């Protein structure tokens, strides 16, 4: 069922568990192969491109949750056979959760870190869904069971906190009040170490209460990500239980923190662009995760005896808060979640290497004891002595007046200390009880409304945040938008949402949606501009990317399976409306199991980036940047010199609307630049709130919307070389095709076999057998006459072009001189090539390959 490794040397080493999940829908559609195997505590991963080089890793625990399971009547996933290798949620808790709970009850700090790429199964292991409860809810249940079982020997107090870290900002997920700009501050004290100032701690006395608090936190997290234009997969979530145990007989208090950390997705970012961009990419996409890796690497070096001068805890908010968990006073467990699919190899091998370093870290955990109760007893005893002394002084008369004042001052001071210690918990409990009653009333009201009215349900890229927000559409007319000033308004937040964005009309048990002027509303993948009747399970997108599922009246619902309308479904529907779907990338006759995994990856990259591009366009519009972003599929219609398809990828075309300047950004570059755009956007709105302060324009070299101008590859044409093997002249009119198959130009080119002096050979020099060239000298000329119908220059006359090409084994490409401002420029270029001794390799190249002529676009400044 699960594999457990040998005990690590040193009782406080970070323990590491690895869990392999089943294939998801994307991977099944791609016909993915499992590249991970498991034997005991050893994980082996196979590089799909090199079957001869498997890598093996050994951990404390290894969980096989990929196959060998079934679903019972209650919905639990269990092993198909008793004693099977499948590791269910219960077995994971037995190994990891039990140890965390036991350590906390003993007075140790305990930490659980969940690490892995987005979609690798972190949230399932941590939270779970339905009856398959994860580590957090199960730990919560067992904690309160243990408290009830030991209530005769100790008094226990549990405080619950929940926070999120995004872009180095801390958001309190239990605080529904207004947030301070920049989030909560992280401070440091000598005794406490790093802590979050003002973080709400809610006292709890039952597991259902914690469950409701987590639901509230998830709702606030959903709203916060919308407000900040953030993606929850790029944020860290921390759940903190503070357990205080008072042992009356020993007069000892033990206090321990249980930190449960769901780390941000660990996607590997491929470096691209200038050196400046590399520096941005290394920090901007997720400073916390990068710093965590640096801390783990440094601590792993310390553990093996290397001299490490500095451990960079202070470089990020996350590592500050986890200082005790990594190399400090905590017993720590990391669970690394893996996809088993071949298309996720790079991310999986990266996760395994990360986990391997983490297991070397050694902590110094101690029991956190404090003599709080002893202090109370001592204060009471001292007060009794003070009262006796006061009584005697009263009999001695006025001589002892000064001493009496001092004794009364000490008595008052002690009483205040005792009262503070004894009443703090009761005050917290009363506050929590009031808050609990409000939450319960809200939940009850929401459930009643669901049975009476239609509503829209939020759909989020993070499945844990989907279905959290329900906006009810009661009878009558309702405005939906940013404004909540009207009693008949439904307030929503998000990029591109107007003050009054659209109107819902619920009349005679029918619901209509009407966009208002200038508002973007999409229903089932198609933009609408007039009153539209909604049907049960229609998909709505408001603004740039606020996605909702429409749920009709209860009589319309039936037994529908709503789960298939996930975030990918919305984006796939949008892509299909643009003409992009799997059939457009693959042979439509291919069955899903035969679909090229690389093409499927490109398709899912496309639908993943679509909402990000929409958001970037909205930010550009609101910030008056005059820049437009558009997704393209790189190399969709292009091939190499052998005629083989080039590897396809996603690029983003960035166009200045004012002067038509164009940039092409890689996927990784766009993702990182968008992160910087979000920072700029948030800063802009914060400054707008400060008395409408005007800001100076950002310099171009620091503006994430702009880049230095560079030549752009517009397309290519193939001039096949086979005629040269027979010494036959060739004259062609070549169609230059763009990356997506558009005709960029017509190129007139010639291949002319010639003498060493450049004289063109005649018919008498034609060869019947190309092998006659072997060992002999070969001369020919490439003539580029004219380029006609340049689409690039038609769009903006201040542009130019040049042709680039590389012959056979040339180290560097050659380029023609630039020609400017002409749609049909004369090139009139002639290049002479010579091979003194024609080799077999060159002859085969001539017979089987083409000269790839690349059309490069140049831009005026």
Image (spheres, rainbow, N blue to C red):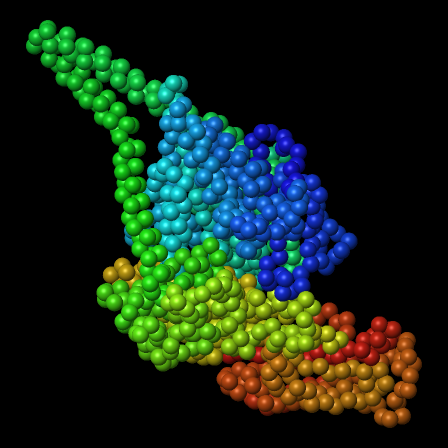
Residue 566 spot, x, y in % from top left: 49, 63
* Image-quadrant location for residue 202: top left
Q: Tell me: 330 left or right of 831.
A: left
Q: Can residue 19 be seen in this view?
A: no
Residue 537 spot, x, y in % from top left: 44, 69
Rendered residue at 81%/83% (across/down):
722
Rendered residue at 43%/53% (across/down):
166
Rendered residue at 20%/13% (across/down):
386
Residue 742 spot, x, y in % from top left: 60, 83
Up the image or down, 425 lies above or below 627; here it is above
Rendered residue at 52%/61% (across/down):
277
Q: Tell me: 94 left or right of 534.
A: right
Q: Can residue 552 be seen in this view?
A: yes
Residue furthest to the left: 398
Residue 361 spot, x, y in % from top left: 58, 36
* Image-quadrant location for residue 299: top right
Up the image or down, 61 lies above or below 443; here it is above
Residue furthest to the bottom: 763
Q: Tell me: 354 left or right of 839.
A: left
Which of these two is toward me, 660 or 90? 90
How many numbered dots are placed on residues in this image? 0
Up the image or down, 858 lies above or below 252; here it is below
Which of these two is toward me, 400 or 110? 110
Q: Tell me: 175 left or right of 711.
A: left
Image quarter in which the N terminus is found:
top right
């Amino acid at each position: 069922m699960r594999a457990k490794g040998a005990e690590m040397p040193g009782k406080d080493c970070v323990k590491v568990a690895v869990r392999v999940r089943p294939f998801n829908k994307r991977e099944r559609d791609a016909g993915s192969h499992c590249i991970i195997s498991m034997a005991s505590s050893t994980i082996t991963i196979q590089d799909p491109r090199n079957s001869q080089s498997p890598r093996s890793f050994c951990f404390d625990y290894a969980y096989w949750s990929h196959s060998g399971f079934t679903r019972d009547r209650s919905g639990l996933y269990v092993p198909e056979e008793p004693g099977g290798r499948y590791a269910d949620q219960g077995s994971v808790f037995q190994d990891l959760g039990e140890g965390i709970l036991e350590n906390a009850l003993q007075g140790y700090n305990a930490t659980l870190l969940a690490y892995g790429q987005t979609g690798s199964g972190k949230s399932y292991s941590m939270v779970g869904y339905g009856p398959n409860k994860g580590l957090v809810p199960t730990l919560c249940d067992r904690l309160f069971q243990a408290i009830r079982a030991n209530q005769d020997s100790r008094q226990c107090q549990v405080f619950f906190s929940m926070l999120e870290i995004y872009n180095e900002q801390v958001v309190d997920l239990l605080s529904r009040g207004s947030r301070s700009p920049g989030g909560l501050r992280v401070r440091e004290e000598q005794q406490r170490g790093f802590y979050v100032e003002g973080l709400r701690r809610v006292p709890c006395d039952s597991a259902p209460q914690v469950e409701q608090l987590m639901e509230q936190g998830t709702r606030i997290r959903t709203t916060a990500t919308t407000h900040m234009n953030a993606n929850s997969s790029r944020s860290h979530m921390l759940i903190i239980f503070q357990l205080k145990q008072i042992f009356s007989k020993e007069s000892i208090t033990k206090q321990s923190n249980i930190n449960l950390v769901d780390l941000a997705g660990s996607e590997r970012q491929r470096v691209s662009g200038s050196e400046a961009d590399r520096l941005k990419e290394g920090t901007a996409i997720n400073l916390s995760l990068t710093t965590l890796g640096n801390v783990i690497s440094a601590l792993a070096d310390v553990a093996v005896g290397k001299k490490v001068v500095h451990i960079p805890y202070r470089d990020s908010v996350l590592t500050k808060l986890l200082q005790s968990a990594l190399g400090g006073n905590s017993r720590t467990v990391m669970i690394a979640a893996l996809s088993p699919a071949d298309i996720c190899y790079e991310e999986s091998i990266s996760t395994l290497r990360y986990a391997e370093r983490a297991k070397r870290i050694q902590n110094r955990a101690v029991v956190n004891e404090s003599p709080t109760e002893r202090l109370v007893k001592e204060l009471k005893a001292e007060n009794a002595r003070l009262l006796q002394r006061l009584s005697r002084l009263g009999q001695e008369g006025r001589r002892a007046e000064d001493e009496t004042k001092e004794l009364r001052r000490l008595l008052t001071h002690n009483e205040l200390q005792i009262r503070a210690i004894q009443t703090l918990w009761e005050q917290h409990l009363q506050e929590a009880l009031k808050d609990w009653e409000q939450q319960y009333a809200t939940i009850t009201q929401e459930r009643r409304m669901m049975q009476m009215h239609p509503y829209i349900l939020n759909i989020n890229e993070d499945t844990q945040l989907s279905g959290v927000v329900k906006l009810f559409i009661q009878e009558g007319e309702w405005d939906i938008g940013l404004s909540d000033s009207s009693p008949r308004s439904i307030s929503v937040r998000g990029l591109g949402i107007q003050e009054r964005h659209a109107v819902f009309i619920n009349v005679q048990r029918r619901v209509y949606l009407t966009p208002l002027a200038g508002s973007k509303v999409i229903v089932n993948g198609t933009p609408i501009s007039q009153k539209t009747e909604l049907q049960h399970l229609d998909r709505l997108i408001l603004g740039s990317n606020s996605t909702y599922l429409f749920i009709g009246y209860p009589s319309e619902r039936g037994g529908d399976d709503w789960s298939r309308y996930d975030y990918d479904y919305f984006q796939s529907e949008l892509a299909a409306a643009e003409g992009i779907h799997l059939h457009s990338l693959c042979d439509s006759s291919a069955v899903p199991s035969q679909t090229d995994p690389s093409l499927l990856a490109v398709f899912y990259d496309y639908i993943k980036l679509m909402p990000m591009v929409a958001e970037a366009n909205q930010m550009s519009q609101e910030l008056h940047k005059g820049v437009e972003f558009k997704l393209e599929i790189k190399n969709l219609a292009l091939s190499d010199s052998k005629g083989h398809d080039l590897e396809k990828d996603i690029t983003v075309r960035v166009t200045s609307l004012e002067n038509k300047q164009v940039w092409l950004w890689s996927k990784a570059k766009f993702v990182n630049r968008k992160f910087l755009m979000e920072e700029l956007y948030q800063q802009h709105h914060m400054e707008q709130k400060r008395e409408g302060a005007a800001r100076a324009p950002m310099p171009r070299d620091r503006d994430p919307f702009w880049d230095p101008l560079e030549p752009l590859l517009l397309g290519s044409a193939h001039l096949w070389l086979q005629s040269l093997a027979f010494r036959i002249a060739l004259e062609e009119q070549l169609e230059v095709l763009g990356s997506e198959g558009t005709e960029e130009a017509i190129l007139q080119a010639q291949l002319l076999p010639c003498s060493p002096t450049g004289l063109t050979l005649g018919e008498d020099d034609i060869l019947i057998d190309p092998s006659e060239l072997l060992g002999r000298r070969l001369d020919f000329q490439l003539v580029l006459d004219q380029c006609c119908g340049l689409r690039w220059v038609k769009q903006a006359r201040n542009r130019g072009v040049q042709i680039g090409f590389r012959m056979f084994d040339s180290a560097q490409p050659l380029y023609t001189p630039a020609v400017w401002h002409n749609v049909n420029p004369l090139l009139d270029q002639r290049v002479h090539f010579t091979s003194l001794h024609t080799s077999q390799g060159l002859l085969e190249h001539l017979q089987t390959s083409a000269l790839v002529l690349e059309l490069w676009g140049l831009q005026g400044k």
